[in-house]
Image (cartoon, rainbow, N blue to C red):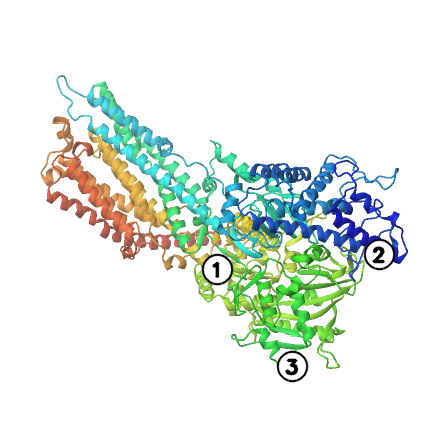
Amino acid sequence: EAKMVKTFMETVINQAIENQTVSIETMADGDPDKKDNGDAHTESSTKTTPLEIESGDADTKKFTTAGEGSGSGYPTTQQSPRFGGLAEIVDASLRSLQSAGSAIVHHINFTKVNAAPGAPFAVTAKDLGDLSSERSHGALARVLEKAASNLPPCEDGEEESLKSVRMQIEALVRRIGTEEEDVDNTIHKDEDETVKYRKSDAHKHDMELAANALATVILRSKPDEGITREQSDIDFRREAFGTNVITEKNLDSFLKLCWDAIQDFVLIMLLILGIIGIAVETTVGLEEGEKCGACWIEGAAILAAVAIVVLVTATIDYHKQFSFIRLTQSLHETNTKLVIRNGAQLSVIDDDIVVGDILSVNAHNQASIPADCVVLGPPISGGLKMDESSLTGESVLITRNPGDVVLSGTSAVQGSAKMVVIAVGVNSVAGKIKAHVYESTDHNGDGLDGDDESPLFIKLEKIAKQIGMAGTGAALLSLSVNCIKGFAIGNEDPKVVIEYIVVAITVLAVAVPEGLPLAVTLALAFSSNKMMKEQNLVKHLDACETMGCATTICTDKTGTLTANKMTARAVYTNETDYSCTDPAVSLGDFVRGSPDRPNQLTIDMLSTLIAINTMDETTLEMDTAGNIKSSTGNPTEVALLAFVCSLGNNYQDIRESTRGRSGKGDLSEFLVEGKQIGFSSARKMMSWAVPRIEGGYRIYCKGASEVLLARCNHQLAKSSDGVDNNETAVELNDASRQDILGIGEVYARRGMRTLALSYRDLPDGVDFDAKSDSVLNADGSEAFEVETNLTFIALVGIEDPLRPEVPGAIEKCYEAGIDVRLVTGDSPNTAVSIAFQAGVLKAFHFTDNADEMIAINLKPNVLMEGKVFRRKVYRIDDGGKKEFDQTAFDKIWPHLRVLARSSPDDKLTLAHGLNQSTLFTDKKACRQLKEEHNILVFPDRQVVAMTGDGTNDAPALKRADIGFAMGVAGTQIAKDAADIILLDDNFASIVTAAKWGRNVYASIQKFLQFQLTVNISAVVTALVGSFAYAKSPLAAIQLLWVNLIMDALASLALASEPPTDELLKRDPVNRSKSIITNRMWGNMLGQSSYQIVVIMFLLFAGPEVFDFEPGHEVERLTNENSIHYTFIFNAFVWMQLFNEINSRSLQGELNVFRGIERNPLFCGILLTTAVLQVIMVEFGGKAMHVHEDGLSPELWGISIAFGIASLPIQQVINILYLFFHRYYGIWRERRRVKASRRLSTRHIDP
C-alpha cells in the first residue's frame, strides 16, 4: 500500500516540477519517503494509507463531491488555493488514488467469495443488530474494527491486496472513531498548524468508503453486482444472520378460545340452568323412596349442548386464526422489492431478502424499507430523504447519506439510493419491536380490530341489545306470572320456584340471538375467501360490507382501466410526425424504415436522453434473439426503453458508458458528478444532468408536453447541409410550438399519453439549486433555472390499451347506481378519450352540437384540470389561509366525471368532499339537478371507493370509505393504507368487490330474517306455555338444539349464497336505514304468525284431534316425555327448516328455489340438519326430552307437512304485502292531498 501511495505521490510531484509552479515542500506532509519509513502504529503515523492522504490538509486536498471533475476535460467547480494552476493535476492524481483504493476493495471481495464461499463471516447478526440499534457512525466504525480483527491474519506469501484491506479499514476506523468522540485529529504540516477533522466532505467520503467496505469486505457483496444467486449462498446467509420473517404471534390455544366462548352471558345462564337441573332432579325433585335412574340426563344434555356451542365457537375462532395467517401470507406475497444479485435486478418478496443483498430504492417504486440497511455510495444528486415517523414519531423528513443506517419500516419519500441489508427479521429494529409486541399477553393484533366500528356491526349491536332487552322483559314476565299463579293464587310448594326460574331462563335463551355475531363473522369470512379467488385481497373484513354501500368509485387510469402495458406508438421529431398504426410493427422499426427518417444524430440523442433520464429500477430483460422477455419498473419508462431498443440502441450500454450516470465498473465512482432532479407531481417532469467531455453539463429532461414546451426556446431540426450527424438547433417560434401542441392533441385524441423530451447544455460552475424568476412549476412554485431555456427534441405518444372487460364493468356500475369518476394525471384530451372509450363518459355528457367527443365539447364541470379544481374548491379565509369550501364543491361534484392533470392532493380533496357532502338534504337542489341535468343524487351520504398505487395516494386511500391499492403496480405504502388490494390491478375486480359487498349485506339480512322469525315464535310459545301450564312445551334442551341449528348451520348456509347479477341492478345500500326492511318485517311477522298458530293449535287442540294424552298431564303424572310435546318440537323444527328456504328471498320473489342448485353447501347443510332432526327425535330420548319411542309415521308426515306449508304461506305473505303496500300508499297520498287542500283553502285573518 505504501508503495502504491509513493508511486502516486511521485506522479503528483513530477507533474508539479514540470510545470514549475510548486515545490515539493508544498505537497501534503512533505517527502513521501518519510511516509514509507514511518511508524504505522503511532498517533503521528507517517505510513499513510491512500484514504488518509485524501483526508489531509484542507488547503491541499481536492474531494470528489457533486459537481467536481477530474481534470480530464470534465468541469471543475472548486479550485485549490494552495496549488493554483495545478489544482486539476492534483485532483486527477487524488481521484486516481481513490479509484485505486476502491478497486482494491472490490478485488478483495471477489477473491474471498471465490476462495471460501462457506467461510464464517467476520461479524455476527448481533453485531449488525447493534449497529441498527445505535445508528451512529461510531457504531459502524466499531463493526468495521471488529471485522478487521476477525479477518484472516496476514501470512507470508499472502497477496498484497489482501494485506492492505486491514490497513484501510483500520485507517477508516481511526478517523471515524475520532470524529465520533469529537477529538482533534491532527495532520502535521509544520509545528504550528493543525486541522480539525470534523464532518466535512472528507468525512462524507470516508463514510461512503466505510459503507462500501462493509458491503464488499465484511458481507461479501458488491454494490454493483450484489450477492450470488446460488441458493447455497442465500441459505448460508440465512443461517448466519437469520431470515427476514418475524415469528408470528403465538396462536391462542384451543382451551383459551373455549374459555373466551363460555364468557357469553346466555351460555353462563344455560350452564347454571344445567347444573341447577341436575341438582334439583337428583335431590329435591325426587319423591320419598323414588330412585333417580336417568333423572339427571336432561341437565346433562343441557350442559352437553353448552359444550357443543362452546366447541363450535372455539373451533371457528381457531380456524379464523389460521385464515388470518393465510391472509397475511397472501399480503406478504405482494410485498416485493428490487435487489441486485449477480449484477441483475430481481424482484423478490420481502421474506426472501437476506443480509448482504443490495437493495435498490427510490421514492416512486417500492418505497417501504423491508430490513435495516446501510446506504451505499456514491450519493445520487438530490439525496435520499426518509420518513421515519412510523418509528420515531417525527414527521420531519430525514436526509440519509452513504454510511447512514436506514431502518426497516421507514419509507423513502424523495430521491433514490442503493443500500446493503445488514439486519433482517428479529435482528432489525422494527423486527425487535414487532417480536416484543407479539410476546405481550395483552396484544390483540388479529387484524380485525377495526371491524367493531363498521356501520353494519353498529346496526347489529343495536338490534341485539333491543332483542336482549325484550327477551329479558319476557323472562321476567314469565317468572312474575308463574310466581303470582303459584304462590299468590295457588298454594304451590316453594321448591317449584326452581322450575319457574328454569322456564324464565328458557324464555331468555330463545329470545337472545347469540349466534348473530357468529353468523356475521361467517358471512364476512366466507365472502372474503371467495373475493380472494376473484383477485380481491381483503385486509379488513368490514370492507366487504362497506363496499356494498359504495355510491362513487374514483379510479385511476393506468393499469386499472388500461392494461398497463405502455407502448410507444408515435413520435414527433425533426419537425416530422411518425405515427405507427400497425400493431405488428414497433415504432422504432417504423421510424428507421421511414423514407423521411430523422438523422442519426437525432436518433442517438433520443436514445441517450431516454437511457440516461430513466430510473435504474426500470429494466428490460431480453432473450437471446434480442426480444423483450419481461420488464420491471415504471410502465411509461419501460415503453421508452423499448423504443430505444427498437431504434437499434442498447440503453444499458449507454447508461454504463456515461460518466455521471453509470453505477457500475470504473465509472461508478463518478456517479456523484451526475445531478438527478427527480420527478414530482409539483413539477410534472424529471431531469438528469451529466458532465460533458467538452466541459460543463448537459441536462436531459422529460415530462408533460405542455410543461416542457413552455420552457423550450429551440428545437432540434434536420441539418440543412444534408450531413446525417450534424446537430442543428433552430428557434422554436410560436407557430412551431402550436404545431407541436396540435400534434400532441392528435395523439391525445387517440388515447395516447404524450411526453416531451428536451435538453440543455450548461456551463461550468452552474448552480443547480438556482430558481427561475419567470418560470413556475405546475403547482405555482418557482422552477429550477437549469430546467428552462431548453431545446426540444421530440414528442412521444405512448399508448396503454383499454382492458377489454372495463366497458362492461363500468356499465354494470351505472346500472347499480354507482358513479364512476376518472382521476388521472394525463392531459384532458387523453383522459377524455380513455373515459369515453371506457364508458365513464356518455354521449349526453357532451354538448348537443358536438361533432367530436373531445374535451372542448364537454358540458361545464364534467371535466376539470387539477389546478382549476383546486382554485374552485378552496378559498382564502380572513387569516390568509386556504380552506376547503364544501358549498363550492357541492356545486361541482354532481357534474364531475373526469379530473385531469390531477395531483395526489386532488384525490384526497375529492374523497373528503364527497364523503362530507350533505347535498342530499337539499331537496330543492336535488330536484333542480334532476329536472335540468337529469342527475340523480343518492339520498344519503356518499360512500367513496378510491383506487391508488403510489405512496402519495396513501392519504386519499385512508380518507376514502374503501381504499383499493394496486397489487402489481402499487407501492407498499399504498397497500398498507388500503382496505382491499386488487391483485390484478383491474377495474372489473372492483365491480366484483361491490357485488360481494352487497351479497354480504344480503346474507346477513337473510340470517336476521330467519333468526328473528324463530325468536318471535319461540318466545311466544314459551310464554303461553308458562302461563297455561307453568312449563314451556319446548324444553330448554330442544330450544338449544334449535338455536344451535340457527347459530352454526343456518348462518353458514345462508352466508354461502353466491352473489347474483341482480344485486348490481339495485341501488346501493342506504347506510342510515335499518338493516331490517319493511319487507323483512312482513316476512318475519307472517311466518312467525303461521308458526304460532300451528303451535297453539297443537298445544291446545292437538290431543283431541290426534288422539294422544296432553303433554303437561303425562309429564306431571308419569314423569315421562310425552308424544304431545315431542310432536310440537318436531313440527316447530320442520317449519324452521323450510322457512330457511324462504329466507333466501328478501324481495318477495316467487321462486324461492331459484339458484339453489348453484349452492351445494346450502343443500348439504339443509339435508344434514334434517337427518340430525330425525336422529334427535327417534333416538334422543330423555336427553332431548322426546318420547322414548319417537313419533309414528303419521305424525312424522304431519310434522313435515306443516313445514312444507311454510312455502305457500310465503306466497300468501307476498300477496298481502303487495296489497297492503299499494293501498297504504294510496291512503297516504289521499291524506297528503286533503292536507294540502286544507292548507290552500283555510281562512287567514288579516
- Depth check, mark 1 against mark 3: the one in front is 3
- The answer to which of 1096 and 817 lies nearer the viewer is 817
- Residue depicted at 20% across the width and 28% down the height: 297
- The answer to which of 848 and 787 lies nearer the viewer is 787
Q: Which mark is residue 987?
A: 1
Which residue position is annotated with label 2?
Answer: 15
- The answer to which of 1176 and 90 lies nearer the viewer is 90
Q: Residue furthest left?
A: 1107
Q: Secondary structure at mark 3?
A: loop
Which residue position is annotated with label 3?
Answer: 596
Marks 1/3 in contact by CB < 8 Å: the verdict is no
Tell me: residue 1081, above or below residue 469.
below
Q: Position of residue 225 (x, y in %)?
A: 59, 54
Q: Residue furthest top?
A: 288
Residue 1067 visible to the viewer? no
Residue 894: quarter of image:
bottom right
Q: Position of residue 885 (x, y in %)?
A: 63, 51
Gap in angstroms between the C-alphas marked 1 and 3: 41 Å
